[in-house]
Amino acid sequence: MTPILGFAPDAEKTMPGILTACSHVIPYEAGFRGAPSPVAVTADALAAECRGAVVAVKLDGTRRILAGTQTKLYELTGSTWGDVSTGSYTGSSETRWSFCQFGDTTIATNLVDAMQSSSATTFAPIAGAPKAKIVVSASNNFVLAFNTSDPTYGVNQDGWWNCAQNDQTNWAPNVSTLANRGRLVAVEGPIQAALTLGDYVVAYKHRAIFVGIFVGTPVVWQWNLIPGGEAGVVGQEAVCDIGGAHFIVGNDNFWLFDGTRPAPIGDGVTRQWFLNNSSPTYRYRTKVSYDKQNDLVRVNYPSLTSTGQCDATLVYHVKKKQWGNDDVTTEASLNFIAPGVTIDGLDAFSSTIDGLPDVPFDSQYWLSGGQTPAYFNSSHRLVSLNGTTASSSFTTGDMGDDDAVTLIERFRVRFEQSPTTASATGFVKFNEGDALMAGATNAINDGKFDLRQSGRFHRVRVDMTGDHKEYAFDAKPRALGGR
């Protein structure tokens, strides 16, 4: 049996174990599995497109689930999104909400409207704070704002600004409070994204990475340009923290950055495929999120045919360094933290057993504090990835030899968990570079797929429904003759 290596469309097509295509198949510790289907959370749909969401955790561990549209901020209470805005915001067709938690205070910003804060219920503008595209909360008790606009200092797309230490309400630069501001000008362009990394703060441009270190008065934050070519991010949400490092979607590759130098991870696997199959016009809208419990990074991006929506998804397993695919349309991502459910509380989901969500009862979806990856779909509804796999498929690489015509009579997949249904379609060609010719399609029979096809190279597509797990496959091409 050949171990499955995962989705590797950039690899040489005869490399054993690669998948040249897959749909709703993602890596896990022992192999690959069907991606969970989305299940609607018991919450109303937002009134408009979600432009950012967060689970904000206070110092006592209590949580707030917040989401923003272009003109409003909302908090989820029970199944209702309550309006916690100060009036209506202006925003723009492109603005996204950036959130950070500073003690018990949640701070939100969208660059167009005044920076907002809330420790309970309604948000209110922070007097004297700059407008900013991005806010982050640093471990040294500062809030930092990036890509700023202010009546006194003007528009500084390459600018950074920090509040007074321990006081998110005071943004007036002053050496005694350590409030300060500056610009990152060693490389051209605006600051696109920012994220903490331990005690550091990392600011990203399109083709540059700056690491900020707290050094105290008078400069407060010292910014070092990281060597690494043109590594940077494509957009505001194209980076996430994976625990001790950042996963980055750059202009020319996928990167991991641990604070020293960025390391490319897409070469020879998915780099060129991603550039060829994502929209150059809307690639900056790429959204990256980390599913810690499954050690998966989800890269939601606009496909070539997208009109702006993030309608395609690559999935990367951090420890295994393998890729999968799980295309969904995403407005915003977050790790949903469940409120928990009792037997008596099941009526909130359905009046009948048959009407309950298609989620296993041992899923964290039902547990208080259980975390599950979630996103807002194109209907502005929050859904969690807990459901039974719907339809899924994978396609192998090419099996065979340039100098021999071979026959495969059967194809086997070593399942750890068999799907509900499965069928396989064989494809053949006689020379690498030729078009594939489709052969027969047969359902699984006694753990195998009977194909009986001849050619120099063979490729097999397996279509499945229901949950499944697999870690190897085999075809055993048999030589028919030579000359």
Image (spheres, helix red, strand yellow):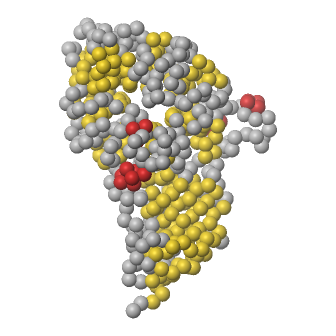
Residue in the picture at 57% in, 64% down: 462
Q: In the figure, 57 relative to 413: above or below?
A: above
Please tell me in which quadrant of the rendered image residue 221 appears.
top left
Visible residue check, residue 297: no
Visible residue check, residue 345: yes
Question: Residue 288: horizontal and vertical position, in percent?
Answer: 44, 39
Q: Nearer the viewer, residue 349 or 103?
A: 349
Question: Residue 86: horizontal and vertical position, in percent?
Answer: 52, 12
Q: In the figure, 204 relative to 166: above or below?
A: below
Q: Nearer the viewer, residue 59 or 423?
A: 423
Residue in the picture at 31% in, 33% down: 204
Q: Is residue 183 left or right of residue 139?
A: left
Q: Is residue 36 left or right of residue 404?
A: right
Q: Nearer the viewer, residue 112 or 386?
A: 112
Quadrant in which the C terminus appears: bottom left
* Residue farthest bottom in this picture: 483
